Amino acid sequence: MSTDMAPARPTLRDVGALLRQADVQARQAMAVPALVRHQLLPEQAQALREDDLSLTGGFVESLAVQLAKALTGSADLGPDIARHAVLAHAPTTRLLFARAIEARLCRQSSLLGHGTPELPPRVEAQVGDAQDELAEAAMALIIAQSRFLSRAQAFAIDTDELPPETLHGLVRSCLAYLQERPDSDPLELNRAAAAFLQGFDERRGRPHRLMRFCHLFELPRSAEAWSLAENGASLTVAMLERTSGLPADFLFDMLRDADLARLAVVLRACGLETDVAAGLLQGLAALASLRADALPPAADLRALVPEDAARLVAGWRNLDPLAHPGALW
Protein backbone atom coordinates (compact mmCIF):
# COMPACT_ATOMS: atom_id res chain seq x y z
CA MET A 1 0.00 0.00 0.00
CA SER A 2 1.38 3.43 -0.88
CA THR A 3 2.32 5.73 1.94
CA ASP A 4 -0.14 8.43 0.86
CA MET A 5 -2.96 6.04 1.76
CA ALA A 6 -1.78 5.59 5.34
CA PRO A 7 -3.96 7.18 8.00
CA ALA A 8 -2.81 10.53 9.37
CA ARG A 9 -1.62 9.92 12.92
CA PRO A 10 1.24 11.24 15.09
CA THR A 11 4.32 9.12 14.62
CA LEU A 12 7.23 8.82 17.01
CA ARG A 13 9.30 11.00 14.71
CA ASP A 14 6.61 13.72 14.63
CA VAL A 15 6.30 13.72 18.41
CA GLY A 16 10.04 13.83 18.88
CA ALA A 17 10.53 16.79 16.53
CA LEU A 18 7.74 18.80 18.11
CA LEU A 19 8.88 17.98 21.62
CA ARG A 20 12.40 19.08 20.81
CA GLN A 21 11.08 22.35 19.40
CA ALA A 22 8.83 22.95 22.42
CA ASP A 23 11.67 22.10 24.78
CA VAL A 24 14.02 24.58 23.10
CA GLN A 25 11.37 27.31 23.15
CA ALA A 26 10.61 26.74 26.81
CA ARG A 27 14.29 26.84 27.73
CA GLN A 28 14.87 30.02 25.73
CA ALA A 29 11.85 31.75 27.25
CA MET A 30 12.84 30.79 30.77
CA ALA A 31 16.56 31.51 30.30
CA VAL A 32 17.28 28.28 32.16
CA PRO A 33 20.42 27.17 30.32
CA ALA A 34 22.17 30.52 30.60
CA LEU A 35 21.35 30.91 34.28
CA VAL A 36 21.99 27.41 35.59
CA ARG A 37 24.80 26.36 33.32
CA HIS A 38 26.63 29.52 34.30
CA GLN A 39 25.98 28.98 38.02
CA LEU A 40 27.00 25.32 38.20
CA LEU A 41 28.80 22.68 36.20
CA PRO A 42 27.06 21.20 33.17
CA GLU A 43 27.24 22.07 29.51
CA GLN A 44 24.52 19.89 27.98
CA ALA A 45 21.37 18.11 29.03
CA GLN A 46 20.76 14.42 28.49
CA ALA A 47 19.24 13.59 25.10
CA LEU A 48 15.54 12.86 24.91
CA ARG A 49 14.79 9.17 25.45
CA GLU A 50 12.87 7.21 22.86
CA ASP A 51 10.73 5.44 25.48
CA ASP A 52 9.64 8.82 26.85
CA LEU A 53 8.79 10.03 23.35
CA SER A 54 6.86 6.86 22.58
CA LEU A 55 4.79 7.14 25.74
CA THR A 56 4.18 10.83 25.05
CA GLY A 57 2.89 9.89 21.62
CA GLY A 58 0.45 7.47 23.26
CA PHE A 59 -0.69 10.19 25.65
CA VAL A 60 -1.23 12.56 22.72
CA GLU A 61 -3.40 10.04 20.89
CA SER A 62 -5.32 9.17 24.06
CA LEU A 63 -6.16 12.81 24.77
CA ALA A 64 -7.09 13.42 21.14
CA VAL A 65 -9.59 10.55 21.13
CA GLN A 66 -11.21 11.80 24.35
CA LEU A 67 -11.50 15.33 22.93
CA ALA A 68 -12.83 14.08 19.60
CA LYS A 69 -15.59 12.15 21.36
CA ALA A 70 -16.42 15.07 23.64
CA LEU A 71 -16.51 17.71 20.87
CA THR A 72 -17.80 15.75 17.87
CA GLY A 73 -19.43 12.69 19.41
CA SER A 74 -17.09 10.37 17.52
CA ALA A 75 -13.47 9.25 17.73
CA ASP A 76 -13.03 9.43 13.95
CA LEU A 77 -11.20 12.76 14.03
CA GLY A 78 -8.90 11.68 16.85
CA PRO A 79 -5.79 11.28 14.62
CA ASP A 80 -6.36 14.71 13.04
CA ILE A 81 -6.91 16.38 16.41
CA ALA A 82 -3.74 14.74 17.69
CA ARG A 83 -1.66 16.19 14.88
CA HIS A 84 -3.23 19.60 14.44
CA ALA A 85 -4.45 20.50 17.94
CA VAL A 86 -2.84 18.51 20.76
CA LEU A 87 0.69 18.52 19.35
CA ALA A 88 0.24 22.14 18.31
CA HIS A 89 -0.48 23.21 21.90
CA ALA A 90 2.94 23.70 23.52
CA PRO A 91 1.84 23.65 27.20
CA THR A 92 0.04 20.33 26.69
CA THR A 93 2.96 18.80 24.79
CA ARG A 94 5.36 19.89 27.50
CA LEU A 95 3.18 18.51 30.27
CA LEU A 96 2.54 15.17 28.57
CA PHE A 97 6.28 14.70 28.10
CA ALA A 98 6.73 15.35 31.83
CA ARG A 99 4.03 12.79 32.64
CA ALA A 100 5.88 10.26 30.48
CA ILE A 101 9.09 10.89 32.43
CA GLU A 102 7.15 10.55 35.69
CA ALA A 103 5.64 7.22 34.65
CA ARG A 104 9.09 5.90 33.74
CA LEU A 105 10.54 6.93 37.08
CA CYS A 106 7.63 5.33 38.93
CA ARG A 107 8.17 2.06 37.10
CA GLN A 108 11.87 2.22 37.87
CA SER A 109 11.30 2.76 41.61
CA SER A 110 10.11 -0.80 42.18
CA LEU A 111 13.20 -2.15 40.41
CA LEU A 112 15.38 -0.27 42.90
CA GLY A 113 13.58 -1.75 45.90
CA HIS A 114 11.52 1.34 46.71
CA GLY A 115 8.26 -0.58 46.90
CA THR A 116 5.32 -0.29 44.53
CA PRO A 117 4.82 3.22 43.12
CA GLU A 118 1.06 2.94 43.64
CA LEU A 119 1.61 2.60 47.41
CA PRO A 120 4.44 4.87 48.59
CA PRO A 121 5.12 3.96 52.24
CA ARG A 122 4.70 7.60 53.29
CA VAL A 123 1.20 7.72 51.86
CA GLU A 124 0.16 4.20 52.82
CA ALA A 125 1.14 4.83 56.44
CA GLN A 126 -1.37 7.66 56.66
CA VAL A 127 -4.38 5.52 55.75
CA GLY A 128 -4.83 3.05 58.62
CA ASP A 129 -8.21 3.08 60.31
CA ALA A 130 -8.28 6.82 60.89
CA GLN A 131 -11.00 8.87 59.27
CA ASP A 132 -9.26 12.21 59.49
CA GLU A 133 -8.59 14.52 56.55
CA LEU A 134 -5.04 13.29 55.98
CA ALA A 135 -6.14 9.65 55.87
CA GLU A 136 -8.83 10.47 53.32
CA ALA A 137 -6.36 12.45 51.23
CA ALA A 138 -3.91 9.55 51.34
CA MET A 139 -6.51 7.03 50.16
CA ALA A 140 -7.64 9.34 47.34
CA LEU A 141 -4.03 9.80 46.27
CA ILE A 142 -3.33 6.04 46.26
CA ILE A 143 -6.34 5.46 44.02
CA ALA A 144 -5.38 8.30 41.66
CA GLN A 145 -1.74 7.18 41.48
CA SER A 146 -2.75 3.61 40.73
CA ARG A 147 -5.05 4.74 37.93
CA PHE A 148 -2.38 7.00 36.41
CA LEU A 149 0.18 4.19 36.28
CA SER A 150 -2.23 1.54 35.02
CA ARG A 151 -3.45 3.90 32.30
CA ALA A 152 0.15 4.76 31.39
CA GLN A 153 0.88 1.06 30.87
CA ALA A 154 -1.76 1.16 28.16
CA PHE A 155 -0.27 4.38 26.70
CA ALA A 156 -3.33 6.30 27.85
CA ILE A 157 -3.90 9.29 30.11
CA ASP A 158 -6.93 11.05 31.60
CA THR A 159 -7.80 14.70 30.97
CA ASP A 160 -7.71 15.38 34.72
CA GLU A 161 -3.91 15.01 34.55
CA LEU A 162 -3.92 18.48 32.97
CA PRO A 163 -4.31 21.61 35.08
CA PRO A 164 -7.44 23.64 34.26
CA GLU A 165 -5.67 26.42 32.36
CA THR A 166 -3.81 23.90 30.20
CA LEU A 167 -6.99 21.96 29.47
CA HIS A 168 -8.86 25.16 28.57
CA GLY A 169 -6.06 26.16 26.21
CA LEU A 170 -6.06 22.70 24.64
CA VAL A 171 -9.82 22.81 24.07
CA ARG A 172 -9.45 26.22 22.41
CA SER A 173 -6.77 24.73 20.17
CA CYS A 174 -9.13 21.90 19.23
CA LEU A 175 -11.98 24.29 18.52
CA ALA A 176 -9.78 26.44 16.31
CA TYR A 177 -8.84 23.40 14.25
CA LEU A 178 -12.33 21.87 14.07
CA GLN A 179 -14.02 25.13 13.16
CA GLU A 180 -11.82 25.44 10.08
CA ARG A 181 -13.24 22.24 8.67
CA PRO A 182 -15.85 22.86 5.94
CA ASP A 183 -18.43 20.58 7.55
CA SER A 184 -18.13 22.10 11.03
CA ASP A 185 -20.98 23.63 13.04
CA PRO A 186 -19.33 26.35 15.21
CA LEU A 187 -22.32 26.76 17.50
CA GLU A 188 -22.59 23.04 18.18
CA LEU A 189 -18.83 22.78 18.74
CA ASN A 190 -18.92 25.65 21.23
CA ARG A 191 -21.80 24.05 23.11
CA ALA A 192 -19.98 20.73 23.25
CA ALA A 193 -16.78 22.40 24.48
CA ALA A 194 -18.66 24.32 27.17
CA ALA A 195 -20.34 21.13 28.39
CA PHE A 196 -17.03 19.27 28.44
CA LEU A 197 -15.24 21.97 30.43
CA GLN A 198 -18.17 22.37 32.80
CA GLY A 199 -17.88 18.71 33.71
CA PHE A 200 -14.18 19.04 34.52
CA ASP A 201 -13.37 19.12 38.24
CA GLU A 202 -9.68 19.51 39.02
CA ARG A 203 -10.27 18.26 42.58
CA ARG A 204 -10.72 14.76 41.15
CA GLY A 205 -7.36 14.89 39.43
CA ARG A 206 -4.14 13.36 40.68
CA PRO A 207 -2.15 16.65 40.61
CA HIS A 208 -4.65 18.26 43.00
CA ARG A 209 -4.61 15.21 45.27
CA LEU A 210 -0.81 15.26 45.38
CA MET A 211 -0.86 18.93 46.38
CA ARG A 212 -3.60 18.29 48.93
CA PHE A 213 -1.58 15.55 50.60
CA CYS A 214 1.52 17.79 50.64
CA HIS A 215 -0.50 20.56 52.24
CA LEU A 216 -1.84 18.33 54.99
CA PHE A 217 1.52 16.68 55.51
CA GLU A 218 3.06 20.12 56.16
CA LEU A 219 6.04 19.81 53.81
CA PRO A 220 8.66 18.16 56.04
CA ARG A 221 12.34 18.94 55.58
CA SER A 222 14.08 16.29 57.69
CA ALA A 223 16.23 13.65 56.02
CA GLU A 224 13.76 10.89 56.85
CA ALA A 225 10.75 12.84 55.61
CA TRP A 226 12.45 13.54 52.25
CA SER A 227 13.40 9.89 51.71
CA LEU A 228 12.82 8.91 48.09
CA ALA A 229 12.15 5.32 49.15
CA GLU A 230 9.36 6.53 51.46
CA ASN A 231 7.71 9.02 49.11
CA GLY A 232 8.26 7.71 45.60
CA ALA A 233 8.97 9.88 42.59
CA SER A 234 5.55 11.53 42.23
CA LEU A 235 5.19 12.66 45.83
CA THR A 236 8.83 13.78 46.04
CA VAL A 237 8.40 16.05 43.02
CA ALA A 238 5.04 17.28 44.35
CA MET A 239 6.73 18.24 47.63
CA LEU A 240 9.38 20.14 45.66
CA GLU A 241 6.68 21.76 43.53
CA ARG A 242 4.81 23.05 46.54
CA THR A 243 7.97 24.23 48.32
CA SER A 244 9.69 25.85 45.34
CA GLY A 245 6.66 27.18 43.46
CA LEU A 246 7.96 25.69 40.20
CA PRO A 247 5.55 23.62 38.07
CA ALA A 248 5.95 19.84 38.13
CA ASP A 249 6.63 19.62 34.40
CA PHE A 250 9.63 21.92 34.85
CA LEU A 251 10.90 19.79 37.74
CA PHE A 252 10.54 16.52 35.84
CA ASP A 253 12.39 18.10 32.92
CA MET A 254 15.30 18.71 35.31
CA LEU A 255 15.58 14.95 35.78
CA ARG A 256 16.86 14.73 32.19
CA ASP A 257 19.98 16.73 33.06
CA ALA A 258 22.97 14.42 33.26
CA ASP A 259 24.25 16.12 36.42
CA LEU A 260 20.96 17.29 37.98
CA ALA A 261 22.50 20.74 38.46
CA ARG A 262 19.20 22.62 38.11
CA LEU A 263 17.60 20.27 40.62
CA ALA A 264 20.48 20.86 43.01
CA VAL A 265 19.66 24.57 42.94
CA VAL A 266 16.00 23.81 43.67
CA LEU A 267 16.81 21.54 46.63
CA ARG A 268 18.99 24.20 48.21
CA ALA A 269 16.37 26.87 47.50
CA CYS A 270 13.82 24.70 49.32
CA GLY A 271 16.00 24.80 52.44
CA LEU A 272 17.18 21.19 52.41
CA GLU A 273 20.40 20.59 54.31
CA THR A 274 23.45 19.60 52.29
CA ASP A 275 23.41 15.94 53.32
CA VAL A 276 19.66 15.66 52.68
CA ALA A 277 19.98 17.31 49.26
CA ALA A 278 22.98 15.12 48.34
CA GLY A 279 21.17 11.93 49.33
CA LEU A 280 18.06 12.92 47.40
CA LEU A 281 20.11 13.79 44.32
CA GLN A 282 21.81 10.40 44.45
CA GLY A 283 18.49 8.61 44.79
CA LEU A 284 16.93 10.54 41.91
CA ALA A 285 20.01 9.93 39.74
CA ALA A 286 19.67 6.18 40.33
CA LEU A 287 15.95 6.39 39.56
CA ALA A 288 16.62 8.28 36.32
CA SER A 289 19.50 5.95 35.34
CA LEU A 290 22.07 8.76 35.54
CA ARG A 291 25.69 8.45 36.57
CA ALA A 292 26.25 9.34 40.22
CA ASP A 293 29.78 10.60 39.55
CA ALA A 294 28.35 13.35 37.32
CA LEU A 295 26.37 14.94 40.18
CA PRO A 296 27.55 18.17 41.82
CA PRO A 297 29.93 17.22 44.65
CA ALA A 298 28.99 17.86 48.27
CA ALA A 299 31.44 20.78 48.41
CA ASP A 300 29.53 22.55 45.63
CA LEU A 301 26.23 21.94 47.41
CA ARG A 302 27.61 23.40 50.63
CA ALA A 303 28.94 26.40 48.72
CA LEU A 304 25.51 27.00 47.16
CA VAL A 305 23.90 29.37 49.67
CA PRO A 306 20.14 28.75 50.03
CA GLU A 307 19.39 32.46 49.69
CA ASP A 308 21.28 32.63 46.38
CA ALA A 309 19.56 29.49 45.15
CA ALA A 310 16.17 30.92 46.17
CA ARG A 311 16.82 34.08 44.16
CA LEU A 312 17.69 32.00 41.13
CA VAL A 313 14.56 29.87 41.47
CA ALA A 314 12.44 33.00 41.91
CA GLY A 315 13.81 34.20 38.60
CA TRP A 316 12.75 30.95 36.95
CA ARG A 317 9.22 31.41 38.29
CA ASN A 318 9.05 34.96 36.94
CA LEU A 319 10.39 33.97 33.53
CA ASP A 320 8.19 30.90 33.09
CA PRO A 321 5.56 31.81 30.44
CA LEU A 322 3.51 28.74 31.38
CA ALA A 323 3.54 29.31 35.14
CA HIS A 324 0.24 29.16 36.97
CA PRO A 325 -0.79 29.81 40.57
CA GLY A 326 -1.05 26.87 42.92
CA ALA A 327 -4.17 25.61 44.64
CA LEU A 328 -5.76 27.78 47.28
CA TRP A 329 -6.51 26.01 50.56
Image (spheres, helix red, strand yellow):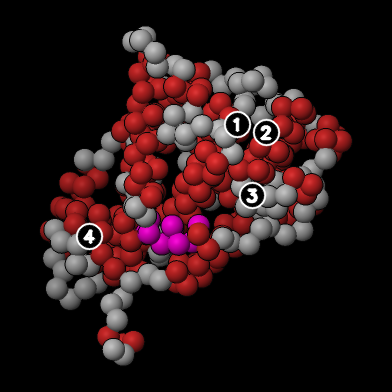
Residue 221 is left or right of residue 191, and the answer is right
Q: Secondary structure at mark 4?
A: helix
Point out which mark residue 68 bears. 4
Q: Residue at x 68, y 57 (%)?
A: 45
Residue at the disc numbered 2: 280
Query: Where's the N terminus, which quadrant?
Result: bottom left
Residue at the disc numbered 3: 289
Amino acid, disc 2: Leu
Pinpoint residue 14: horizontal percent, then vertical percent: 45, 72
- Label tally: 4
Q: Nearer the viewer, residue 26 or 143?
A: 143
Amino acid, disc 3: Ser
Mark 3 burial class by Cα count in 10 Å: few <14, some 14-19, many 20+: some
Amino acid, disc 1: Leu
Say which label, 1 or 3, has the lower sequence index.
Answer: 1
Q: Is residue 15 above or below residue 272?
A: below
Q: Are marks 3 and 4 in contact (CB under 8 Å)?
A: no
Pinpoint residue 222: horizontal percent, then vertical percent: 66, 19
Say which label, 3 or 4, has the lower sequence index.
Answer: 4
Say which label, 1 or 2, has the lower sequence index.
Answer: 1
User: Between marks 2 and 4, how big is the CA–CA gap?
Assistant: 42 Å
Please give the range of residues in magenta: 52-60
Residue at the disc numbered 1: 228
User: Between marks 1 and 3, how big is the CA–CA gap?
Assistant: 15 Å
Point out which mark residue 310 bears. none
Say which label, 1 or 4, has the lower sequence index.
Answer: 4
User: Between marks 3 and 2, how big is the CA–CA gap?
Assistant: 14 Å
Q: Residue at x 19, y 67 (%)?
A: 76
Residue 173: quadrant of the picture: bottom left
Q: Are marks 1 and 2 in contact (CB under 8 Å)?
A: yes
Q: Residue at x 50, y 41 (%)?
A: 106
